[in-house]
Amino acid sequence: MAQSQGWVKRSFKAFCKGFFVAVPVAVTFLDRVACVARVEGASMQPSLNPGGSQSSDVVLLNHWKVRNFEVQRGDIVSLVSPKNPEQKIIKRVIALEGDIVRTIGHKNRYVKVPRGHIWVEGDHHGHSFDSNSFGPVSLGLLHAHATHILWPPERWQKLESVLPPERLLIQSEEE
């Protein structure tokens, strides 16, 4: 009987040691490196959720890639909603700081993106709450870069950083 209690005690100790190491490592990984998220809504159709309300894509979000606010035009990013800080939204980067962008339904026809900001839009223009509604977004609201579709299995793919042809810039700071 004493031997079985010793085995249980050793097993419990080993479990606790593993648990108290694994949990902080997992939390740090999910917070700083990468995580997965389910995409809801129609704002990024057809790139994400092409089946509409029948399906939701699950994407890999890379936190590490945006740690220095290094994003490119065409990247699909997750960010904290400027209107509701408890909500995360997923949009495509259309313009970077210094770029002049032609808006779609914004109060100004053309907007120069201020320093430290980006212009983001959903791919499905009529169904997207984006920079055309709330203006340029601070880089500080960036959460992650969406890099791959993980689910459903038939949609496994790398997400390409492509600027839609109809959203080409009027002028970029690089010119």
Image: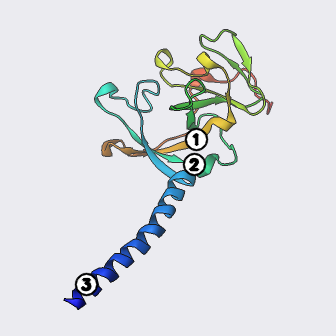
Residue farthest along the left direction in this orientation? 1
Look at mark 1 in the image and give the residue it sits on. 143
User: In the figure, residue 167 lies in which quadrant?
Assistant: top right
For the C terminus, the quadrant is top right
Asked where in the image residue 83 lies, by quadrant, the reply is: top right
- The amino acid at mark 3 is Gln
> Which residue bears the numbered disc 2?
63
Closer to viewer: mark 3 or mark 1: 3
Q: Is residue 162 left or right of residue 56?
A: right
Residue 143 % position (x, y) = 58, 41
Which tag, 1 or 2, sits closer to the chain's start? 2
CB-based contact (under 8 Å), mark 1 and mark 2: yes
Dot 2 or dot 3: first in sequence order is 3
Q: Which mark is on residue 5? A: 3
- Tell me the distance, in whole angstroms, between the alpha carbons under discs 1 and 2: 6 Å
Q: Residues within 10 Å of mark 3 (few under 14, many from 20)?
A: few
- The answer to which of 85 and 132 lies nearer the viewer is 85
Kind of residue at disc 1: His
Residue 55 falls in which quadrant of the image?
Answer: top left
What is the CA distance from the residue labelled 2 to the residue labelled 3? 45 Å
Could you tell me which secondary element the residue under label 2 belongs to? loop
What residue lies at 46% left-to-right and 68% top-to-bottom? 20
- Which residue lies at the image location 32% right of the left edge and 79% below the top edge? 11
Query: Left of 98 or right of it: where is 167?
Result: left
Disc 1: CA contacts within 10 A as few (<14), some (14-19) or many (>=20):
many
- Helix, strand or loop status at disc 1: strand
In the displayed structure image, the side of residue 94 where residue 30 appears, left or right: left
